[in-house]
Amino acid sequence: MSGMAAVGAGGAERPRLSLRWREAINFYLFLAPWILGFLAFTAIPIVASLFLGFTKYNAISPPDFVGLKNFRFLYNDQVFWKSLRVTLTYTVVFVPLQLVSSLLLAMLLNLRVPSMRTIRTIYYLPSILPTVVTGLVWIWLFNADFGLINFFLYKAFEIRGPNWLGSERWVMSAVIISGLWALGGGVIIFLAALQNVPGEFYEAAELDGANILHRFWHVTVPMISPVILYNLMIAMILSLQVFTRIYVLTQGGPNYASYFYNLYVYDNAFSYLKLGLASAQAWILFVLILLLTVLALRTSGRWVHYSGGV
Amino acid sequence: MVLTRRRFLKSSAVAATGLALAACVPAEPSVDMPAGTGGDAAMTEITYLIRSDIGVKIQEWTDEAIADFATVEPNITIETIGVPWGDYNAKLLAQYAAGDPPEISANYAAGFPTFYANDAIVALDELVSENNVDLSVIEQAALDAVTRNGKLWALPLAHLPTIVYYNLDALEEAGATIPPIDWADTSWTTDAMLESANAAAQDMDDPTKAQYGMIFGNGQLGVFEWLWGADPFNDVGGPEHTEAYKTGIVTESFYDSETMNNFIGWVYDAIYGSSPVSPRPSDTDAIQQLVGWPMMSGRIGMAINGAWSVTNFAAVEPSWRWGVGAFPYGPAGVNTSPLFNDSWMLGKGAKEQDAGFRFLQYLAVEKGAELYAKITGFFPAHKENYPIYFDSLMNIPNFALSREEAETALLDAFNYGYVTPGKTLDSYPEWNRTFNQTMGPIWNAEVSVADGLAQVQAQFESVIESKS
């Protein structure tokens, strides 16, 4: 039977596909579920949002092409610029703090002390807790009159703490502090990188008389610099897209002092029925992230060391 | 057939693709079919978007109403989708964008005016007439609130005035004036209320022990200014002079007016003045996180809120006696109470218009309305169900009023009310966000009232300009 598989009803031999074609078909058949999912949930929405960015669209009526009107509107919109300023301020302050804190924590967690596995697990826990839940806890902690933070400040230093979430001046600090609590993701990656630094490099440096700071600066940092770059880019992208924590903590207030970019995109899209405008905003953010990522990559040649010489 | 590696791989790939595609097919509705109707080809399914965050009573009412409706109309099944207030708009929009709007939704979040302005809902007049629906049973003011250009765009289920709630035990102990039930009692003024709050306030220096005299608030977009004889959206007088409440379109605002300064200044002094009676925002937030509506903490003498807050007393069953009273007269000699309505709409483009309206009719004027009055604790728009509502109200523990007094306090409110902006303005969420954001610095005492209101006005002007 197997030898006759290619013989058709008329007895003529069906032309067989070449091995290359058969493999290609198999390849795409296996990929098909992912490709379909990618097209339906990522590629087509991205293209559609680009088109919608040039329309007036409220999800109820068909989109109406308006050219560059959405972009012109945003250019003249005070809230747009304020939300952009808030987001960039947060990114500029938060990302370096997060990187340094994550690296320091990873170095601590890289020490050989008893129960280190348990300690590592505990430090990672905040990263897997739901943001909404931790946000509600932070609201309590930051409460001006009843919060633990102000209670501690008063008991320890007799300082009357600020109205963290209600003050235009302090709300950004509160948002940054609450963000620094969940460092687990970056810490894990730094920890893996630290554990991959060959021990003999440190031994050689020690023999050359390098102290702990020299070893950190001239061995650790260059060796893990590709991971620093990776964490930098991820932290930057995530900082520019902060949403859930702010939605729970402050709703963007007071007076737009914590009105992050994505909160404004969400409001325009789903509260104000301006999906065209929100799409234009989303594309502006995309271009901004792209530019910053390219900038980070372009400058990385000066400080990132690839051991393979890449 | 021999299962070769190639055949196995091909079959697996085809099966995986099939499964992926099958996952994209909508699941069968989870709603139970009424007994005896299973498999009937004439079954019609409609979608009903409800709020999932306003207490178990709404869910209980929904379940009971749907079960009862199944006995009335066995060929119509209801698929309910529950979403909280904050996501209500997003869900509704997503359904419209997908070309599958729900047959029935309520005027929460963006509300009826926004959906009316965007041509997203169906005018109900023809359906009302075709189905001989008797609308005279519904409170006329509630119907007026959902009428635009002479057409009816929704059917109201709840019609709710803004009233004063009070902790009778706390007020009596302090010897403070009790808010009257009589809405015509002109001796009950904002100053009288402040005096009463002053008597009730204790330990205001210590937020852990403080007994607050009152929480007044500002009303939606600051409309408690009505008591001062003005409105944020006209420079002539009260809400009756505001064109935006009739058209839904805001074209001007007057947040930096003298009256708004006087009104906000009065509320500000109640919080930060030399003898404060109201909690600061951070204290309110803390109490709110513990008990929800701060009044339920037992630490507030009086609080102003919509009549829906009766449901809080039913849920919490406080150990202290409580009551409801009339809105106070302001310096302008009026006690205009903002009126709310919860109305249900028929989605334009929804597939089952007739079945949808049938269910809407059931909810608004038939047994559904009766169950609503009995179960939810929301003041019904259906006048014949008032007795059912008051029966339920009188069953709430420690309610200090007689039935007659309760009827006076709540029913007379409608003679003094005006529909609140959240139920009349197009794009209300945007106005609300603008107002709340820009009022923050005032309520947190970071700027003076005058400077803060100037910022509010500037931001409103900016939004108005962007919409023009």
Image: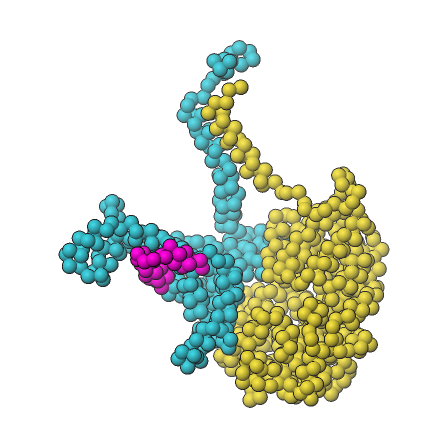
For image coordinates 51% across by 13% down, the residue present is: A1
Question: For residue A85, what is the image quadrant?
Answer: bottom left
Relative to B314, does residue A68 appear above or below in the rendering?
above
Viewer-proximal residue among A44 and B29: B29
Quick check: can you spot residue B81?
A: yes
Viewer-proximal residue among B182 and B232: B182
Viewer-proximal residue among B192 and A288: B192
**Which color has been applied to chain B in this rendered view?**
yellow
Viewer-proximal residue among A218 and B272: A218
For image coordinates 68% across by 84% down, the residue present is: B171
Residue B259 lies in the magenta stretch: no
Please indicate whether residue A212 sits to the left or right of residue B237 in the image: left
Outermost residue on the top side: it is A11
Relative to B92, does residue A259 appear above or below in the rendering?
below
For image coordinates 40% across by 56% down, the residue present is: A118
**Which color has been applied to chain A in this rendered view?**
cyan
Please indicate whether residue B164 sits to the left or right of residue A252 in the image: right
| Residue B330 placement (x, y as % from top left) | 68, 83
| Residue A283 placement (x, y as % from top left) | 46, 54
Please indicate whether residue B400 sits to the left or right of residue B83 in the image: right
Magenta stretch? A97-126
